Image: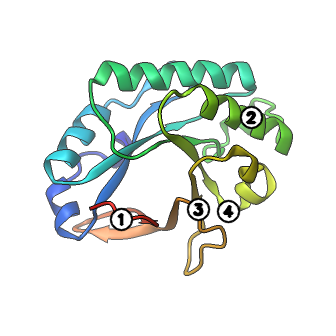
């Protein structure tokens, strides 16, 4: 969930049987999600467990370290507590990395993930599509929670969490649908 979802009816989300949410806290080296605090507060008020994610625009390990600092500052400044990990979203969904000559190399991207995981200071993991996890990230070497986005009926990795759809309908809105492998109650 992020500011891109607009105003979310968190009570409707909870009434639909959802037990947890992963809310975007920050992006890149300097930006914060404008609705992070509101989304976390409202999700907690609706009885959900909450984690966070940071969307990466880093092009190298040094920028990944600066992203860790942005993410940590955003969470610390919010004063909020999170029950679930903070995830590093390394994909290039908007094509920004490709437009800025990013090196799409498994060693390079895995190094950036290691920098984030090692320096976050809280329970954290990596989010990516199944394709990215198989081709661009040596996820086994990270030894952290893995959130696999593999839409359909099968999660071939069975990590920490599985995103099985981007079309989970709650009320009039569509959300990403995720399965958590451990109980969140």
Question: Quick check: marks 4 and 1 in contact, CB under 8 Å?
Answer: no
Q: Is residue 88 left or right of residue 1?
A: right
Residue 108 location (% of width, % of height): 82, 35
Q: Earlier in the sequence, mark 4 or mark 3?
A: 4
Q: Is residue 171 left or right of residue 142?
A: left
Q: Going by the image, does 114 lie left or right of 52? A: right
Give the crowd class for mark 3: few <14, some 14-19, many >=20 residues within 10 Å: some
In this figure, which residue is indicated by the disc labeled 1?
183
In this rendering, is residue 27 above or below 93? above
From the viewer's perspective, is the residue at label 4 or at label 2 nearer? 4
Q: Secondary structure at mark 4?
A: helix
Identify the residue shown where x is 66% and y is 44%.
Answer: 92
Disc 4 target residue: 130
The reply to whether discs 4 and 2 touch (Cβ–Cβ < 8 Å) is no
Residue neighbourhood size for the residue with mark 2, other residues' Cα within 10 Å, grouped as few (<14), some (14–19), many (≥20): few
Residue tagged 2: 99
Label 1, label 3: how many angstroms apart (C-alpha)? 14 Å
**Does label 2 or label 3 sit earlier along the sequence?**
2
The answer to which of 24 and 68 lies nearer the viewer is: 68
């Amino acid at each position: 969930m992020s500011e891109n979802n607009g105003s979310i009816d968190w009570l409707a989300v909870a009434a639909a049987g959802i037990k947890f949410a992963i809310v975007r806290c920050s992006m890149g080296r300097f930006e914060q999600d404008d609705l992070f605090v509101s989304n976390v507060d409202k999700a907690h008020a609706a009885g959900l467990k909450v984690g966070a994610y940071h969307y990466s625009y880093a092009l190298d390990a040094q920028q990944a370290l600066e992203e860790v600092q942005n993410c940590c500052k955003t969470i610390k400044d919010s004063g909020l507590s999170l029950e679930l990990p903070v995830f590093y979203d390394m994909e290039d969904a908007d094509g920004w990395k490709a437009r800025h000559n990013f090196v799409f190399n498994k060693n390079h991207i895995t190094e950036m993930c290691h920098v984030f995981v090692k320096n976050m200071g809280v329970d954290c993991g990596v989010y990516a599509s199944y394709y990215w996890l198989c081709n661009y990230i040596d996820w086994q070497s990270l030894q952290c929670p893995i959130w696999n986005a593999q839409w359909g009926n099968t999660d071939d990795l069975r990590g920490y969490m599985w995103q099985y759809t981007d079309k989970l309908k709650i009320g009039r809105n569509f959300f990403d649908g995720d399965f958590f492998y451990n109980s969140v109650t």
